[in-house]
Image: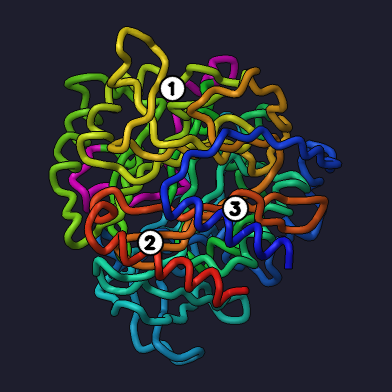
Amino acid sequence: MLVQLLFLSSVLLICVGSANAGETSGFTRNEWPSIDIPLDNEVFAVPKGYNAPQQVHITQGDYDGKAVIISWVTPDEPGSNKVQYGLSEGKYDFTAEGTVQNYTFYDYKSGYIHQCLVDGLQYDTKYYYEIGNGDSSRKFWFQTPPKIDPDASYKFGIIGDLGQTYNSLSTLEHSMQTGTQAILFVGDLSYADRYENHDVGVRWDSWGRFVERSAAYQPWIWSAGNHEIEYFPQMREVIPFRNYLHRYPTPYPASESSSPLWYAVRRASAHIIVLSSYSPFVKYTPQWKWLRQELKKVDRQKTPWLIVLMHAPIYNSNEAHFFEGESMRVVYESWFCQYKVDVIFAGHVHAYERSYRISSLRQNGSSYPVPDKSAPVYITVGDGGNQEGLAKKFRDPQPDYSAFREASYGHSTLEVKNKTHAIYHWNRNDDGKRVQTDTFVLHNQYWGNSRRRRKLKKNVIHYAIANF
């Protein structure tokens, strides 16, 4: 009962807009070793059957959520590049044909990578699909989002810096328990770049099989991190992002982007913008020009929630990667405030942190960020579990702009309720258990100051009471 009252009190404080002092969690977890799971572990198991499809994953395939890109790998020969799909399990009334390619990376040769666009789908519909041939074929399903609508509810998961350790497995399994409908991934996928020579490609393959348990059934919205760059002059591999770009397609042409590393999609009531921290982004570059136009296209009457993904955090009070996002802040922060971005998710720092709404645009002669109601909330979720371990050293004292921070592994969920509010949770991987640790109500920046917000305060209180 006491826990319930404390939660209700926190909801009341959020609703009336009371300021809260920042918190640095004192929780200390017993980590599993930050080492990659051995390749012979069952989590990397190769599907049974000759040339059986593996590393299956889907992502959104268009601008508005009526298409998916289905990707998979066949190890021995190209095989079929067709996807059979339909509205009933085992009954496939439709067929789509994709492309197939392979590539080499140093002395590694990839399997045959298939990518198939399945478009013209109905909204809010469960589809079943089958890939492969004969006894080696495999079956999966996915659910399309509701149509673009300002009050469409939707639940996103947010994961970053995942890797393929036992801690990574805990994050992935816990995320799959939360009922998310799509994953927003903020970069650093496999950490294969920590290997050399042939093993780089091998660890990309193992990671693809590792995440298939989730990524074959719900779309992962991809963004690239520094571990996807893979600049290896000693191996004569100097073209950035080669492994990533061959394996993880994005629907960048749908948003008129010139690169798969930055793009946008609309899903339910959200407009999601993906930026590349490691591509040129200063004034007059392609990414800068694209973002300027994309922000103008955002229609908050149709998609009230404006979400930005990037890898390097703009605001971060951890000693790890401190100030690395400053150059992007200088270039884009004024736009983020002008267009009232609701929340920016980043990774890179292997810990969790959430800011208040702050900016450095109104400094009054100081370089220190100050409260700004037009600014987004900045959330760092680089705590997926990779082999580099946790970033345990936060700067002391905790800055005023930092609302909550903790050096633990975990993942987040953002459950959009309607056009005025969403419920956010950060879930800690607490020694094998999923524990909701940081929770707050996110008010929409565009609609949040209307009369509906005043009505919402009563509704959220009733919602909290009803849940307890």
**x and y, in percent, of residue 232 in the image:** 55, 20
Residue for point 59% across, 30% down: 349
Can residue 155 be spotted in the picture? yes
Residue for point 32% across, 70% down: 152
Residue for point 56% across, 41% down: 381
How busy is the neighbourhood of tag 2: few (under 14 within 10 Å), some, or many (20 plus)?
many
Left or right placement of residue 209 versus residue 429 in this view: left
Which of the two discs, 3 and 1, labels the residue nearer the N terminus?
3
Marks 3,1: beta carbons within 8 A: no
Residue type at mark 3: give it. Answer: Gly
Which of the two discs, 3 and 2, labels the residue nearer the N terminus?
2
Left or right placement of residue 108 versus residue 362 in this view: right
Which of the two discs, 1 and 2, labels the residue nearer the N terminus?
2
**x and y, in percent, of residue 180 in the image:** 52, 65
On the image, numbered disc 2 is attached to which residue? 69
Marks 1,2: beta carbons within 8 A: no
On the image, numbered disc 1 is attached to which residue? 325
Can residue 51 be spotted in the picture? no
On the image, numbered disc 3 is attached to which residue? 208
For the C terminus, which image quadrant?
bottom right
Q: Is residue 303 above or below residue 393?
A: below
Residue for point 73% across, 35% down: 387
Q: Secondary structure at mark 3?
A: helix
Q: Is residue 238 above or below residue 405?
A: above
**x and y, in percent, of residue 273 in the image:** 31, 45
Left or right placement of residue 170 versus residue 142 in this view: right
Q: Residue 246: within the magenta?
A: yes
Q: Secondary structure at mark 1?
A: loop
Residue type at mark 2: give it. Answer: Ile
Q: Residue 6: within the magenta?
A: no
How busy is the neighbourhood of tag 3: few (under 14 within 10 Å), some, or many (20 plus)?
many
| Segment tinted magenta in the rendering | 232-258
